[in-house]
Image: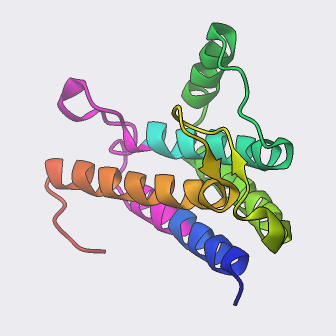
Amino acid sequence: MTVQEFIANETSRAAEALIHQATRMPDGKPSWNPMEEGRSALDQVAECALIGESLPGIIANRKMPDFTAEMMEQFDRDKRSMDLQTATSRLREATAKLCEAIRATPDADLLESMPFWGPEPWTVAAVLNFHNWNMVYHVGQVNYIQTLYGDKDMG
């Protein structure tokens, strides 16, 4: 198994874990904001879908987009426009396309540097793994939301 195959497999698994946790929540809970201040599970799934959609282009171009105010406003509008079914569908589709891009990345590119989040460059390999890492983080956030409304099941 190549590094690219491993990252793609783990990325797919993380997407399905996030979808599983969000869709097993009772009616109304995916859009519930914990403590009136927190982010809902739906918001987090929608964010992962949108980020997943952007990553193949970022990887191909080896550069981040310019985060203008207009771009971020559109990002927020797109997130808010999604229901859970749309968000999970878009997340699956985006993840599948990203996994194709991950698998197609040549070994020789893995240690190249590129700009990504933060001031320091990332290796291409680390960028390929970002969607996986981000979704695993959000699985934990959704699990925490579940405990706040009393769901202590480990399913």
Residue 37 drawn above or below residue 122: above
Which residue extends farthest top?
Answer: 69
Give 140 or 59, whichever is nearer the viewer: 59
- Asked whether, in this view, residue 144 is left or right of residue 24, the answer is left
Residue 7 drawn above or below residue 131: below
Percent across and percent down for residue 86 are 64, 45
Give 63 or 28, whichever is nearer the viewer: 63
Q: Residue at x 65, y 39 (%)?
A: 50
Q: How is the image coloured?
A: rainbow
Q: Residue at x 23, y 52 (%)?
A: 144
- Asked whether, in this view, residue 83 is left or right of residue 112, the answer is left
Q: Which residues are magenta?
A: 16-41
Q: Check the picture and name the quadrant holding the N terminus.
A: bottom right
Which residue extends farthest bottom?
Answer: 1
The mark total stands at: 0
Q: Is residue 149 visible?
A: no
Give 154 or 133, whichever is nearer the viewer: 133
Answer with the quarter of the image where residue 65 lies: top right
Percent across and percent down for residue 68 are 66, 12
Q: Is residue 146 visible?
A: yes
Answer with the quarter of the image where residue 73 lies: top right
Q: Is residue 113 magenta?
A: no
Q: Residue at x 46, y 42 (%)?
A: 44
- Asked whether, in this view, residue 104 is left or right of residue 137, the answer is right
Residue 85 drawn above or below residue 54: below
Give 10 or 3, whichever is nearer the viewer: 3
Residue 63 drawn above or below residue 95: above
Q: Check the picture and name the quadrant holding the C terminus.
A: bottom left
Q: Is residue 24 magenta?
A: yes
Percent across and percent down for residue 101 are 81, 61
Percent across and percent down for residue 21 are 40, 62
